[in-house]
Amino acid sequence: MKPSTMFRILMPALAGMVATATAAGAQAPAPLADPIPGQLAQSHARVALETVVSGLVSPVAAAVAPGDRRHLYVADQIGLVWRVHIANRAEDGDDDDDDDDVGSRQPEQFLDVRSLLVSPLGLGPGKYDERGLLGIAFHPQFRFNGLFYTFTSQPVKGAADFSTMPAGAAPNCQSVVTEWRVQRPGRRNSPVDLGSARELMRIDKPQFNHNGGAIAFGPDQMLYISLGDGGAGDDEGVGHVPGGNAQSLAPGNVLGKILRIDPLGRNAANGRYGIPADNPFVNRDGADEIFAYGFRNPFRMSFDPMGRLIVGDVGQNQVEEVDVVTAGGNYGWRIKEGTFLFDTGGPDAPGFVHADSPGLPAGLIDPIAQYDHADGAGAPPSRVAVIGGYVYRGNRIQQLKGQYVFGDYSGRGGPTPQGHLFVLGRNNRVENLTPVNRNPFDLAMLGFAQDQRGELYLLANGTGTLLGTTGVVMKFVRARR
C-alpha cells in the first residue's frame, strides 16, 4: 500500500524541481512531471457490485478453503478472520435446509489474532497503518490436513530468522508467517485449534510501512510470500543496505522479495519449513528462500489460470506497476519504477523517475502494465497505490472473461476515498472499469478475492484507514440493462 513514508505522505509536486549539476559537472537527471501522458481509457465491460457483508474495519485479504465452496475467509487488518457466506443453494448444489441465500447470514468469526499484533495499530494520520493481519492462505490439502497460514505484524520477540538491522538499532516490528490447524479436518465449519499455532519464520521490519503481506499457494503446492523493501522512502535509511534491500541478495536480506517455501518441509535453517530444491538461489548463502527480487511493496498477488504469478507492486510517488513474476527475476526497484529510471533524490529529497527506459538496464524485467498518478503535468494525483487482483475465470460476466481485474487504493489525500477499478485490455492497456451502481466510487480499494467458481470480490472501506466499521466485501455481478 502507500505512502512511501509517514513523513512523505504529502510531498510537493516534483514538476517544479530543477536539475542541478553534480560535483563532476555533469547534469543531474530532471524529474518527469507527467511520466505517462494522457488519460486512461474506459473499459466497455458492464459490471455492478453487490454487497455481501458490511461492518468490517479494513478487509485486506481473503482466501477460499479447498473443499468449502460456500465461504470466503476474510482477513480484517485489525486481527480478525471472518467466515463469510457466499453461496446459495442453487450455486452449491446442496439442498440442506440450513443453507440460506447469500447475504442472509452474518459473518462468523473464524480466528482472532488481535493479541498477537503489534500495538497500537494506527501510527499515521487518521489511524493509517500498513501493519496488522495482512494475509491468509489455505493449504491445497486443507480438506485432509486442516492447515492454513497467516501473515501478521507482531512486536519484536527475540532474534528474527532474517534481519537487516544494524547492531544497536531496533526494528519497528516483525513480520511473522504462522501455521494453524482446524480441530477436525474435513468437517464442515470446524473451529481452529488455537494451540496449533506454529511459527514458520520471523522477519525484522525496519519501518512500519512496505510490509507486503500477501501469501498464496501456487499450483506447485508451494507457499509464496511477498515482502516489501522494509519501509521509509527510496529503499534507504536504517535497516536498508547500500543500493537498497530490494536489489540485495546478501545473507539474511529477504526484504523486497517474493519467497517460495514448502511449509511441510523441515530443511530450512531454522528447521520449521522446507526449501524447494528448484528455488533459483538455492545454495547461495542466505538466499535459499528467494524466488524473485527487486520489489518495493508487492502488497497483493495471485496466480492466474495458467499458473502465472501476477503481482501489483506499489510505486513511490509516480508510477504503479503490474508484474508477471518468474523464478530468479529482478523486477527493478530501486533502479527503476515501472519502465522508468529512478533517482533517489538525495538524503533530504524524495526520489523521482526521470527517463523512460524500457528493456534497459539489461537484466531487469519490466512490468506488463503500468500507470501514473495524474492525468497531465501539474494535475493533482488521483491515483496513489496499485492493488493487485485476479484474472476473471467465472461465468457470470462474459465481458470480463480472461481479463485481469485490479485497482488503485486512492484512499488518502482528500475527505472521501475515491478508489479506482481497472482491467487490462488489449496489449495490456490499463482501462478504467466503472461499476454502474457505484459511480463515482467512494471507497478505498484494499484487496480482491476469488471464489472457487472464479467469481470476483472487492474488499474496501470508506476511510482508507483503521477508523470506523465501513469495511465491505462486494461481489462483481453482471450489470442489469
Image (cartoon, rainbow, N blue to C red):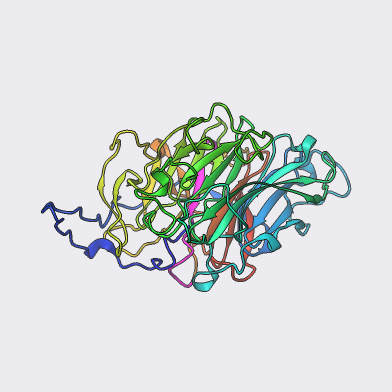
The residue located at (44%, 70%) in the rendering is 414
At which x and y percent is residue 141? Answer: 73, 34
Residue 239: image location, x then y, percent: 44, 55
Residue 75, percent from left and from top? 66, 54
Asked if residue 251 is among those painted magenta in the image, a careful observer would answer no
Report the residue at 80% width, 44% height from top.
89
Q: Is residue 411 magenta?
A: yes
Residue, x 35% and y 50% (percent of image)?
Answer: 242
Regarding residue 79, the answer to whether it shows in the image is yes
Identify the magenta region.
401-415
Q: Is residue 44 visible?
A: no
> In the rendered view, does 48 fall on the left or right side of 347?
right
188 or 258, nearer to the observer: 258
Q: From the image, give the main secondary structure of the stretch colored magenta.
A: loop
The correct choice, above or below, for 425 with respect to 55 in the image is above
Vertical arrangement, residue 259 with respect to residue 283, above or below: below
| Front residue (pair 78, 373) | 78
